[in-house]
Amino acid sequence: MDNNQPGNDKAHVTELRKNAHGFFENLKIFIRDLLEIRDDTDRESTVEAVKKDISFKGHNAWILIFSIFVASVGLNVSSTAVVIGAMLISPLMGPIVGVGMSVAINDVITLRKSFVNLGVMVGLSVLTAYIYFLISPVKEETPELIARTYPTILDVLVAIFGGLALIVAKTKKGTIASVILGVAIATALMPPLCTVGYGLAIANWSYAGGALYLFSINAVFIALSTFVVTKLLGFPLVKYANSRKRRRTAQIASTIAIIVMIPSVILFVNLLQKQLFESKSREFINEVVRYSGAETIKFTQDYQEKTIDVYLIGQRVPQGTIETWKEQMGSVEALKESELIVHQGERGGDINELSSQVRSGILEDLYVRNQEIIEDKDARIVLLENELSKFRGDNFSFPDLSKEIRINYSEIQELGYSNLISTNFDKTDTIPTFTVTWDPGISAAKRNQEKEKFESWLKVRLKLDTLAVKTVN
């Protein structure tokens, strides 16, 4: 028996703790070195670069006009690639980044200049888009335009992370953020401004207002991202000779930051809750609202009213099952305060018993769904026919082939083609078969030689491994 065993175990545990402590210390140092950007931040150069990009005149103004024209064309034809191309040349981020940084460092002069140029940027962009859509012969609503008429959580996230990426890139020593880094900013700003011009051109005020609302939200979050990064990196405050003026300026800047921040955070939370409600309601309908003999043909969701309407046809769902669905919906956090409304006819879900407006919408959905199924089946049939034709050997034009044969084989007087189905009683095969009538003036040896040559040529020409050539005379 080893009397030193307890002491050895204690020493072993101590050693393990020491090693674990060393591992976590090294890991902490590694993560700190990986993510630390304070030491590599050039604060003075960053402030100068931001101030330089604020102004909108001369070259910047013309670049903005041209990029807005390009983006408007892309939205008009629903081309994502064209819109991205416009983003690559767009100088939109300057004034908005200027607002965020000037508030963070209490620079009232730069803040005033940023707001003035922001107004110029918005006015010039909307006017350019308005002129384009006014003279454009194509004024149909496209998915790219409709997507920019209301804010979503994704738009806000793009604005936040795009703004963070841009300002972090701008603060790095020895580099100036290229226009490529402004693509994320342009993603959040350019399409909404173009959509404002589109809404004004077609006199659709809800489109124009919704797009302007989306632009405003995104601009606020980009400026807010800049403000947060600037504060975290410890940019020096602007010094004033009059300390009272400095305190007053700091108070004004802080007030502006709070005024901007609070509604923005509230809006972000509301958008997040709405997106979560819509996502969870779709998931609930697809996974829970099921009943044998009944089919869900349509459902709608209203976040403001907290209602989910489900339209069923087929076998009538018992009320007890519906109550079970409602209890299950109450266990979903995002749907806890929502109401599930199930629509079905009095006699088993007859579609004719629904209102005319709802019935029209359901029939339209059914028509679209059936059209998609039919188109998919048609495409599959065409594909299978093409594949089958390859095996049958009829993936060619017989008239065109006969013209080639006439030029290359003058000894052939008549040509026929068919698919011969043959069997050895173990398997059945389809063999492309050509029947040839030769010129009676040629000898039998010459005919056999030409037949072999013709058969080899057909295999190469038609890319077939198996075919038959039969002589009639």
Image: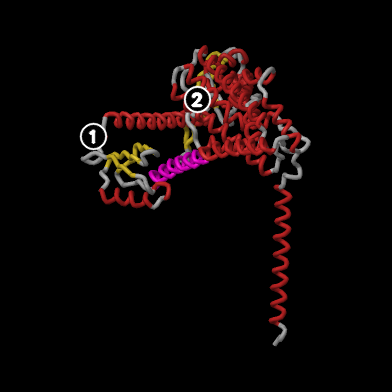
Marked residue nearer the N-terminal end (1 or 2): 2
Q: Nearer the viewer, residue 136 or 102?
A: 102
State left or right for residue 143 relative to residue 82.
left
Q: Nearer the viewer, residue 129 or 53?
A: 53
The rendered magenta stretch, by its main secondary structure, is classed as helix
Which residue has dot 2 on it? 145
**Residue at horizontal 38 percent and vertical 49 percent from the top:** 336
State left or right for residue 50 relative to residue 81.
right
Mark 1 surroundings: few (<14), some (14-19) or many (≥20) residues within 10 A: some
Q: Is residue 115 visible?
A: yes
Element assignment for label 2: helix
Q: Amino acid at mark 2?
A: Leu
**Residue at horizontal 65 percent and vertical 17 percent from the top:** 62
Percent of width and height locating residue 123: 57, 20
* Residue lying at the far left of the rendered structure: 347
Q: Is residue 426 above or below residue 52?
A: below
Element assignment for label 1: helix
- Report which quarter residue 126 is drawn in: top right
Percent of width and height locating residue 162: 62, 36
Percent of width and height locating residue 15: 73, 71
**Residue at horizontal 36 percent and vertical 45 percent from the top:** 338
Q: Is residue 279 magenta?
A: yes
Query: Distance between the Cα atoms at labels 1 and 2?
Result: 37 Å
Q: Is residue 301 visible?
A: no
Q: Is residue 26 above or below residue 54?
A: below
Percent of width and height locating residue 95: 64, 28
Mark 2 surroundings: few (<14), some (14-19) or many (≥20) residues within 10 A: many
Report the disc number at residue 353. Answer: 1
Q: Is residue 461 magenta?
A: no
Q: Amino acid at mark 1?
A: Glu
- The magenta region covers 265-287
